[in-house]
Image (tube, rainbow, N blue to C red):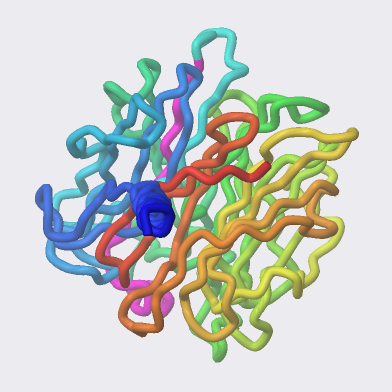
């Protein structure tokens, strides 16, 4: 009986320890916001973690009074600071935080954080009809997120909205309408021909709304001069391609992983570029990455035998947002050798996992910041992947 009791105690401790790994970071109804969504995370050079998301003041809807907020952890994600508001667009929307650290600018040898984001003055459906505008901005920090620069509006450089003639700044022929940065981190090339390039995955709609969201296309924009100027890359060939994230491959190549908004094929769209995201060599559906029309996160986490190791995380279910799963590829996304369950509901349709972002914690551990419990909280969990 003593041995049995000890065994049961060990089992209880095991599950307790597993449960403690998921640490609440942003909890709906606290710290001035009724809802928190769209997580993004970075590990800083000093190993601190900074987590961003949308703080939705009045409810869970995608439009309204929405701020970009941040928290910090100095102990690997075990505890988190109080909330800091980084962007407040008054009663309008500020969202889609896409952070990245520029580690190649000689002016800032300790690194400079870029936080790209969008603002909007109407619901997505109305913007798709031409009734509203989405803009693109960034802020920077040179003290690891303690303070932030004034916002810089780069809409004219990376967006192509056609607005009334009274606003000539936005009078383009392409007629882009809805617009969003990647939900999650942006990326910077660390080596090769494009070393230093910051690439921000994005998507837009063009012209009047079409059935099955065929008016959407994914693409990306980038800077080679540390934010002084920006360039727009070519769109994907797949109509309906939407929320995306990118990662560096070998030989100066780039991979972008996108959501299929049409929903006709419940798998991720994968695109590869050999010119740093300016154009695309190939685009295909990876049926090894099932997806319920949701966001996914992609991260380069190292090199093994000359091949870049990639981590991918999404709600790996073709029917509903749930079953958050981490996958590891040792051959730059050709195959996914390891599958690691992260979180799954107990069958309650109101309790599910959705958006996520990844950060490399160490050579063996990743941090996953993700939406849980039916959008009622954003939590952080460390995962040993090898």
In the rendered image, which quarter is residue 1 located in?
bottom left
- Relative horizontal placement of residue 92, taking residue 164 as reference (left or right): left
Q: Who is closer to the viewer here, 382 or 44? A: 382
Can the viewer see residue 276 in this picture?
Answer: yes
Q: Residue furthest bottom?
A: 211
* Residue at x 37%, y 79% (from the top left corner): 125
Placement of 279 over or under 46, stated as above or below: below
Q: Position of residue 38 (x, y in %)?
A: 38, 57
Q: Nearer the viewer, residue 51 or 323?
A: 323
Q: Is residue 294 above or below residue 189?
A: below
Left or right of residue 21, residue 70 in this image:
left
As drawn, the residue found furthest toward the front would be 1
Q: Is residue 6 left or right of residue 282?
A: left
Q: What percent of the width, then of the height, locates residue 106?
A: 58, 9
Pick the residue in front: 172 or 100: 100
Task: List x then y, in percent, for residue 225.
Answer: 61, 24
> Is there any visible trace of residue 243 in the rendered image?
no
Residue depicted at 51% across the width and 34% down the height: 100
- The magenta region covers 111-131
Residue 161 position, x and y percent, is 47, 61
The answer to whether 134 is drawn above or below residue 229 in the figure is: below
Q: Residue at x 47, y 74 (%)?
A: 322
Residue 375 falls inside the magenta stretch? no
Tell how many labels: 0
Looking at the figure, which quarter contains the C terminus?
top right
At horizontal 39% and vertical 17% (from top left) the residue drawn is 142
């Amino acid at each position: 009986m003593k041995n049995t009791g000890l065994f049961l105690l060990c089992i209880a401790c095991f599950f307790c320890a597993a449960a403690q790994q998921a640490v609440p970071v942003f909890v709906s109804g606290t710290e001035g916001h009724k809802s928190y969504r769209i997580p993004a995370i970075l590990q800083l050079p000093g190993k601190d973690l900074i987590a961003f998301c949308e703080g939705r003041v009045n409810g869970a809807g995608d439009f309204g009074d929405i701020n970009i907020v941040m928290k910090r952890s100095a102990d690997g994600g075990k505890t988190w600071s109080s909330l800091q508001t980084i962007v407040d667009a008054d009663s309008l929307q500020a969202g889609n935080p896409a952070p990245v650290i520029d580690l190649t600018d000689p002016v800032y040898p300790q690194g400079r954080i870029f936080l790209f984001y969008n603002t909007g003055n109407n619901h997505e459906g109305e913007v798709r009809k031409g009734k509203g505008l989405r803009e693109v901005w960034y802020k920077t920090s040179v003290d690891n997120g303690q303070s932030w620069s004034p916002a810089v509006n780069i809409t004219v450089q990376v967006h192509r909205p056609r607005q009334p003639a009274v606003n000539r700044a936005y009078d383009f022929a392409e007629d882009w309408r809805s617009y969003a940065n990647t939900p999650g981190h942006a990326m910077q090339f660390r080596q090769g021909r494009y070393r230093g390039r910051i690439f921000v995955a994005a998507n837009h709609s063009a012209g009047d709304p079409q059935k099955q969201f065929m008016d959407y296309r994914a693409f990306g924009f980038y800077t080679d001069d540390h934010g002084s100027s920006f360039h727009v890359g070519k769109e994907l060939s797949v109509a309906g391609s939407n929320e995306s994230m990118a990662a560096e491959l070998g030989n100066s190549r780039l991979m972008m992983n996108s959501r299929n908004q049409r929903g006709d094929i419940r798998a991720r769209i994968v695109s590869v570029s050999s010119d740093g995201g300016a154009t695309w060599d190939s685009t295909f559906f990876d049926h090894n990455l099932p997806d319920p029309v949701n966001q996914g996160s992609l991260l380069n986490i190292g090199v093994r035998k000359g091949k870049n190791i990639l981590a991918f995380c999404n709600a790996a279910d073709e029917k509903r947002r749930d079953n958050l799963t981490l996958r590891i590829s040792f051959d730059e996304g050709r195959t996914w050798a390891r599958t690691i369950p992260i979180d799954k509901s107990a069958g309650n349709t109101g309790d599910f996992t959705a958006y996520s972002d990844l950060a490399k914690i160490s050579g063996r551990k990743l941090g996953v910041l993700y939406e849980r419990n039916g959008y009622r909280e954003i939590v952080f969990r460390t995962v040993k992947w090898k």
